[in-house]
């Protein structure tokens, strides 16, 4: 099918609307389709099934999902052509490269090592003795080894590490429960050949995420929102301001069961991953290269605040790849009971470098803090923001 209409950003354009109609006619003409198909809009991303009217409305309002290149879920068959007469455009070659695994680069970013081979050669020439690697270096080399280890003997497509990362990615996209993940891993253990490196549980898979810099740390907090038991207060047993005990009861002393436990998610590895894919790295420069300054407010970069900041900090604004972040927070009740006082407050960073319709996507949101408690933190929320502020200062 003709897919040129996907490049039309103006979704009111008649060519885009005609392309949507042609896609729907073709998708609903498949023999396996009755009344509903997967919605390939940017919001649903082929997860939800909808009627023709619903799919058309979403495609006109939200646009077509950019990463959905081969419409295999709607009847298209991908064929690999290996003749020298086929000409591939630059855009297609760029899009194909996005799908390649970046496991090696992810490991380097998570552990902070670059040009390891060159550095090792130089160090071997200069050192007269063999030095044992430290904890971080050991973890780094273990991850590299997992990235090169076959999932099972003879498997050339998937490595031990990439299998875990892709499986966790599918869990996130399809909202699998932890219990279903454990059952799936047990099934893989049974069907794959003997000697395969399949983990035993989802708990073990989460440890890999922590090694890649995608975990979180728990920080105890005072029940009255006075302090965090962090930095200078990490070892004390009671709040120096209100005098309340750190633990729920005497039985919990030293067992890390506090009244409130803040969860802090690191920002640095997720910011680095924005530049791992070529397409995402290109979008991070849109606010300067793609936006048209015609006096109309379409993006935060068109605002007076953004422009005055650039004027005050010309060195920062001169580098297009510097990241502009927006901070947001709001509370919700996890149990859906309006009579419950318990609430949770996520603190989210939004990346404003992206296009206007990408800034607010959950794909590019970064949850940095998760504040639980029986009540809203109110003005004391600044106490909980301390770990995030310190990390932003470091960055």
Image: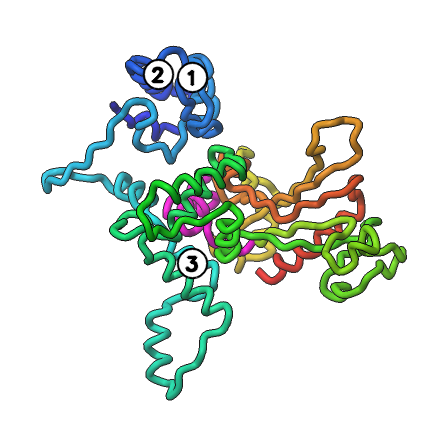
Query: From mark 2 to mark 3, how far is it between C-alphas?
Result: 41 Å
**Among numbered discs 2 and 3, the one appearing first in the sequence:** 2
Eyeballing the image, is 119 above or below 221? below
Query: From mark 2 to mark 1, how far is it between C-alphas?
Result: 8 Å
Of circles 2 and 3, which is in front? 3
**Among numbered discs 3 and 1, the one appearing first in the sequence:** 1
**Which sits in the foreground, 328 or 244?**
244
In the shown orientation, is residue 107 left or right of residue 25? right
The image's colouring method is rainbow
In the shown orientation, is residue 152 left or right of residue 241? left
Q: Residue at x 46, y 65 (%)?
A: 139
Q: Which structural element holds mark 1?
A: helix
Image coords of residue 123 (percent x, y): 37, 80
Q: Which residue is mark 3?
A: 107
Q: Which residue is mark 2?
A: 24
The majority secondary structure of the magenta stretch comes to: helix
**Which sits in the foreground, 24 or 310?**
24
């Amino acid at each position: 099918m003709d897919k040129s209409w996907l490049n039309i950003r103006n979704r009111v354009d008649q060519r885009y609307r005609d392309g949507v109609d042609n896609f729907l006619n073709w998708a609903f003409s498949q023999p396996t389709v009755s009344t509903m198909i997967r919605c390939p809009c940017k919001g649903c991303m082929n997860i939800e099934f909808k009627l023709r009217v619903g799919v058309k409305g979403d495609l006109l309002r939200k646009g077509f999902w950019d990463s959905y290149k081969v419409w295999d879920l709607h009847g298209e068959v991908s064929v690999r052509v290996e003749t020298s007469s086929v000409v591939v455009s630059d855009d297609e070659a760029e899009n194909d490269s996005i799908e390649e695994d970046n496991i090696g680069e992810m490991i380097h970013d998570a552990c902070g090592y670059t040009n390891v081979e060159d550095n090792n050669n130089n160090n071997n020439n200069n050192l007269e003795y063999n030095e044992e690697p430290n904890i971080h270096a050991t973890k780094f080399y273990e991850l590299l080894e997992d990235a090169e280890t076959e999932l099972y003997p003879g498997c050339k497509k998937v490595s031990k590490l990439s299998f875990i990362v892709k499986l966790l990615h599918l869990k996130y996209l399809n909202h699998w429960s932890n219990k279903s993940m454990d059952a799936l891993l047990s099934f893989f253990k049974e069907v794959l050949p003997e000697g395969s490196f399949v983990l035993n549980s989802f708990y073990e898979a989460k440890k890999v995420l922590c090694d890649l810099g995608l975990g979180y740390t728990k920080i105890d907090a005072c029940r009255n929102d006075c302090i965090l038991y962090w930095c200078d207060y990490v070892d004390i047993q009671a709040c120096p301001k209100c005098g309340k005990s750190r633990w729920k009861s005497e039985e919990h002393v030293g067992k890390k069961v506090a009244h409130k436990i803040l969860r802090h998610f690191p920002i640095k590895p997720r910011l680095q991953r924005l530049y791992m894919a070529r397409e995402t790295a290109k979008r991070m420069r849109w606010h300067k290269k793609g936006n048209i300054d015609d006096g109309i407010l379409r993006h935060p970069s068109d605002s007076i605040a953004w422009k005055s900041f650039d004027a005050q900090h010309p060195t920062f604004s001169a580098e297009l790849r510097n990241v502009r972040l927006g901070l947001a927070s709001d509370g919700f009740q996890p149990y859906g009971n309006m009579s419950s006082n318990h609430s949770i407050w996520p603190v989210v960073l939004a990346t404003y470098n992206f296009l206007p319709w990408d800034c607010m996507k959950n794909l590019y949101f970064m949850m940095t803090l998760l504040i639980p408690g029986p009540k809203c933190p109110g003005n004391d929320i600044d106490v909980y923001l301390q770990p995030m502020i310190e990390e932003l200062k470091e960055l």
